[in-house]
Amino acid sequence: MEFDWWTFFFEVVNIGVLLWLLARFLFRPVARIIDERKAETARVLEDAGKARKAADEAEAEARAERDRIHAERVDLLENARAEAEAQKKDLLMKARRQADEVVGKVRAAAEQAAEEEREQRIRRASELSVAITRRLMDSLPADARIDGYAERLVEALAALGADERAAVLAAGEDLRLVAPRELSKAELAAVTKKIASAVPHDGQLPVEVDPSLIAGLELRSRHGVVHNSLAADLGRVAEALASDEQA
């Protein structure tokens, strides 16, 4: 069998043309499609990565926002609790102060009422004692309202301090003798004689009648009074009773 070079040549050319055709119309489009698919796959993967990253970031932001909201809620609750506690303490303090004020006012009112009641009792007792004493003195001789009081007046003057005594007895200062009733000339002369050593005065002192003395003899002037009467004694007894009740 004889080898045909022309046939071999044409076969080689056919194979070459076939390969060229395959390369041009099959391999290149397929390679391009493969490259495009690879590029699309890479893009999809890249987009997926970006989406995953965005999702992770969004989740992190959401978690951070949730934590922030939770922290703010906790702070709000703590602040509200602290404010409520402060308001509670403030209300309690105000209530205590108001209660103390009410108790103080009630105590003061009770003390004032007790003081007024005590003063009324003392005043009633004093008025009663004066009334009883007046009635008793009315049943006694008129001399009983004067007898013995001249000597007591001298003693009362002696008990005063020197300055006070000098002020009361100062000449020209309206010095006068006070009696519970009109004095007879004989009584006035006797009284003047008995007090002459303690009350230096030219002639007899002018006499002022003051029934409120009940009994006694007093000296009065512009600068003071020398108390020496039954009314003054009853007043001192009332003051002593008031001091005892206060104690």
Image: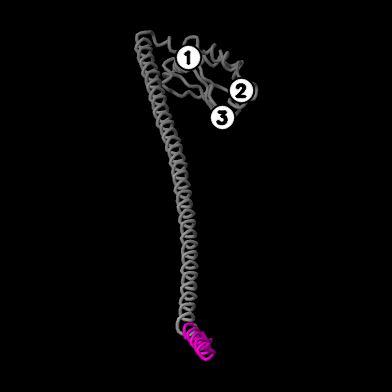
Question: On the rendered structure, is 24 left or right of 113?
Answer: right
Label 3, residues with CA under 10 Å away: few <14, some 14-19, many ≥20: some
User: For the residue marked with disc 1, what is the amino acid?
Assistant: Asp
Which residue is denoted by mark 1 in the rendering? 244
User: For the residue marked with disc 2, what is the amino acid?
Assistant: Arg
User: For the residue marked with disc 3, what is the amino acid?
Assistant: His
User: Nearer the N terminus, badge 1 or badge 2?
Assistant: 2
> Depth check: 81 or 201 in front?
81
Label 1, residues with CA under 10 Å away: few <14, some 14-19, many ≥20: few
Q: Residue at x 55, y 27 (%)?
A: 224
Which residue is denoted by mark 2 in the rendering? 165
* Prevailing SS of the magenta stretch: helix
> Depth check: 149 or 12 in front?
12
- Residue extending furthest right? 162
Q: Residue at x 49, y 73 (%)?
A: 39
Question: How far from the left and from the top, in percent, is residue 245?
Answer: 45, 15
Spatial separation of the CA atoms under disc 3 and disc 2: 10 Å
Instruction: Provide the residue span drawn in magenta.
Output: 1-22
Task: State the SS at label 3.
Answer: loop
Question: How far from the left and from the top, in percent, is residue 44?
Answer: 46, 69
Q: Is residue 12 magenta?
A: yes
State if disc 2 and disc 1 touch (CB < 8 Å). Answer: no
User: Nearer the N terminus, badge 1 or badge 3?
Assistant: 3
> Depth check: 185 or 99 in front?
99
| Mark sitting on residue 223 | 3
Q: Indicate the quadrant where residue 202 lies.
A: top right
Rendered view: 70 above or below 203: below
